[in-house]
């Protein structure tokens, strides 16, 4: 049964790859039909306060050599203009209106079968004087943090998503580009704590300083730099990351990431060194299919090298205006980063800003384990078929069936005097990481995510899948005393914002019906940002100080310390911890 299911999935994946490879020839064959090779450009012109502007003159100029084509439009009462049947290529948009400063944006790409929507904000000629008269207010980015749009991410521009404004019976893709939108240039964060205690390949549970800077190169081309350092005397660590975004966002175009990390592992003289290369691409195939593909190569060294090549592909299909079907192949672990952009588009979740995403890249190495005295990486693969239904404009319901196949399952715990050739000790948390061996299981998931109002959001998930559990009697080593068993889980998460104080509060709980030493549905946990047992997070904007936007944050995982399991093995007394009780907090500045 397993072989047949994997064969079916392989056929599906091969078909998707074949379609993507053959896409250029399909487009070439359809060049005889004018409609299929032309694109659209539409947009809305507003002033700084968000009021649509009537009668603005919009000039669209082709940048193609030898094509001196200019299109002129006037905005209507809603500030909207539309240019149809535009040849693919780069265009310049110029907007003029009496009483406002002229607006000019170059290198706006028009693609076949796609509608590029430009949202333009005009500045008043007296904007500088008005800015001096206004009292200090919170940054405009505050509202963006809580703007929620199904299958799109507002703070990552441009965004490739399904266009919901077409007449019934038509299905087209759309690229939305927001021009003249302010985005933070940099961030500095002072933090303490770890998201994955016990893993030496991730950021340690120690005080650290991190920074990120977003540098615009030309047009929408951006490169983001990030760095982190833990200045501990006995076990210093640090890392740097570079993210190149040709379209300014990882959602609508390619992104290339390079991460370097080094950490001294206690006083034993060992040093962890890691390199991670990641490439991601988003491609629209015709009017019904969207492919998000990527891969990463991880190379780490700790006395001996360990490496892994990790691929991911997601084929999204719009069946009707409210129903979507998705086929997913991803490597496990699929990311410990909150608000992963690849999954955010699927679940309708807010994807991270480019600064925070770059910082998260520093903490996405898979766990480093030891097996018979040599280092290995936590690794596996996830295959999933999912169906989704949009519930109005504020909710999404998903049902999915999946298969997880691990070659190295990471288990975490605490113990003393353990053999170093099997148990990898973490200097800061005093925990260990252990290779639980291979595991293969099937599972399912039913999830609902809905925005009840502008300040309250609810997520509910039921899932079942296999997990490693201990046998009744354990006479040998830990690995020989583990087996795979089905476990069920129910999770709920509430995300709220208190209007007056601006406090962002997240509280969630995931219940598991019996002992589980490994995670139940790890892919779903990362996609919906839930973790086992009780978890609480708070983000509090601070009063304006000097410059920029200050914010304090705190995250507490497994607050009640549930799920701990003690057992005796020939290696010694162990306390296995599927989810550590941990605290992470700090203060950050965006400017």
Image (cartoon, rainbow, N blue to C red):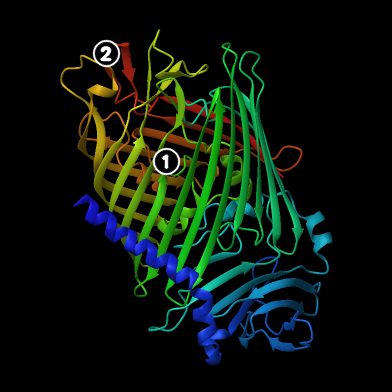
Residue 559 showing in the rendered view:
yes
Q: Secondary structure at mark 1?
A: loop
Q: Quadrant of residue 432?
A: top left
Q: Residues within 10 Å of mark 1 (few under 14, many from 20)?
A: many
From what the image shows, is residue 576 above or below residue 437? Answer: above
Instruction: Say which quadrant the C terminus sits in.
Output: top right
Q: Nearer the viewer, residue 222 or 180?
A: 222
Residue 226 point in image, percent of width and height: 67, 40
Residue 451 point in image, percent of width and height: 40, 56
- What residue is at 76 percent from the left and 67 percent from the top? 123
Relative horizontal placement of residue 78, taking residue 546 as reference (left or right):
left
- What residue is at 24 percent from the left and 56 percent from the top? 5
Q: Nearer the viewer, residue 181 or 31?
A: 31
Q: Residues within 10 Å of mark 2 (few under 14, many from 20)?
A: some
Q: Which residue is denoted by mark 1 in the rendering?
A: 333
Tell which residue pokes out farthest to the top in this image. Answer: 417
Rounded to the nearest angstrom, the CA distance separating label 1 from label 2 is 27 Å
From what the image shows, is residue 213 above or below residue 117? Answer: above
Q: Secondary structure at mark 2?
A: strand
Relative horizontal placement of residue 53, taking residue 20 as reference (left or right):
right
Residue 236 point in image, percent of width and height: 64, 20
Residue 197 showing in the rendered view:
no
Relative horizontal placement of residue 115, taking residue 390 as reference (left or right):
right
- What residue is at 54 percent from the left and 92 percent from the top? 32
- Give the mark, 1 or 2, whose residue is nearer the N terminus: 1
Residue 330 point in image, percent of width and height: 41, 50
Tell which residue pokes out farthest to the left in this image. Answer: 472
Q: Which mark is residue 569?
A: 2
Q: Nearer the viewer, residue 301 or 209?
A: 301
Q: Quadrant of residue 582?
A: top left
């Amino acid at each position: 049964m397993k072989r047949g299911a994997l064969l079916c999935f392989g056929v599906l994946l091969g078909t998707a790859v074949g379609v993507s490879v053959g896409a250029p020839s399909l487009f070439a064959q359809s060049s005889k039909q004018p409609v299929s090779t032309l694109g659209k450009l539409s947009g809305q012109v507003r002033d700084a306060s968000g009021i649509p502007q009537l009668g603005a003159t919009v000039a669209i100029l082709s940048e193609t050599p030898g094509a001196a084509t200019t299109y002129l439009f006037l905005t209507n009462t809603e500030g909207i203009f539309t240019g149809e049947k535009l040849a693919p290529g780069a265009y310049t948009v110029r907007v003029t209106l009496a009483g406002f400063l002229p607006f000019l944006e170059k290198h706006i790409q028009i693609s076949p079968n796609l509608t590029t929507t430009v949202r333009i904000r005009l500045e008043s000629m007296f904007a500088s004087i008005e800015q001096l008269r206004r009292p200090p207010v919170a940054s405009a980015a505050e509202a963006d943090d809580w703007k929620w749009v199904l299958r799109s991410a507002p703070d990552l521009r441009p965004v490739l998503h399904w266009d919901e404004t077409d007449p019934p019976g038509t299905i087209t893709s759309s690229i939305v580009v927001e021009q003249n939108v302010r985005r933070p240039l940099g961030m500095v964060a002072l933090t303490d704590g770890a998201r994955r205690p016990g893993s030496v390949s991730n950021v340690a549970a120690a005080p650290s300083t991190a920074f990120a800077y977003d540098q615009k190169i030309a047009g929408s081309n951006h490169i983001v730099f990030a760095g982190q350092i833990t200045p501990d005397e006995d076990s210093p660590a640090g890392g740097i990351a570079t993210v190149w975004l040709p379209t300014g966002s990882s959602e609508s175009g390619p992104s290339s990431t390079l991460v370097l990390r080094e950490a001294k592992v206690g006083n034993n003289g060992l040093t962890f060194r890691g390199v991670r290369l990641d490439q991601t691409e988003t491609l629209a195939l015709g009017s019904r299919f969207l492919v998000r593909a990527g891969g990463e190569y991880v190379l780490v060294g700790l006395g001996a090298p360990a490496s892994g090549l990790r691929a991911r592909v997601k084929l999204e299909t719009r069946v009707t205006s409210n129903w979507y079907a998705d086929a997913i192949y991803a490597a496990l672990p699929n990311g410990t980063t909150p608000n992963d952009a690849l999954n955010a588009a699927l679940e309708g979740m807010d994807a991270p800003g480019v600064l925070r995403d770059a910082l998260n890249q520093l903490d996405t190495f898979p766990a480093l384990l030891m097996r018979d005295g040599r280092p290995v990486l936590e690794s596996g693969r996830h295959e999933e078929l999912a169906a989704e239904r949009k519930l109005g404009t504020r909710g999404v319901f998903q049902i999915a069936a999946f298969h997880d196949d691990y070659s190295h399952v990471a288990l975490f715990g605490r113990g003393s005097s353990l053999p170093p050739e099997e148990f990898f000790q973490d200097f800061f948390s005093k925990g260990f990481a252990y290779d639980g061996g291979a595991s293969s299981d099937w599972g399912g998931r039913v999830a609902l995510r809905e925005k009840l109002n502008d300040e309250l959001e609810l997520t509910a998930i039921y899932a079942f899948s296999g997990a490693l559990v201990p046998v009744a009697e354990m006479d040998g080593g830990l690995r020989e005393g583990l087996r795979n068993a089905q476990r069920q889980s129910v999770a709920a998460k509430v995300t709220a914002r208190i209007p007056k104080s601006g406090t962002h509060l997240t509280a969630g709980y995931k219940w598991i019906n019996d002992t589980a030493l490994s995670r139940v549905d790890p892919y779903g946990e990362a996609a919906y940002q839930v973790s086992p047992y009780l978890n609480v997070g708070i983000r509090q904007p601070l009063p304006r100080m000097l410059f920029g936007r200050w914010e304090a944050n705190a995250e507490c995982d497994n607050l009640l310390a549930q799920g701990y399991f003690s057992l005796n093995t020939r290696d010694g007394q162990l306390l296995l911890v599927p989810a550590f009780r941990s605290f992470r907090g700090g203060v950050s500045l965006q400017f």
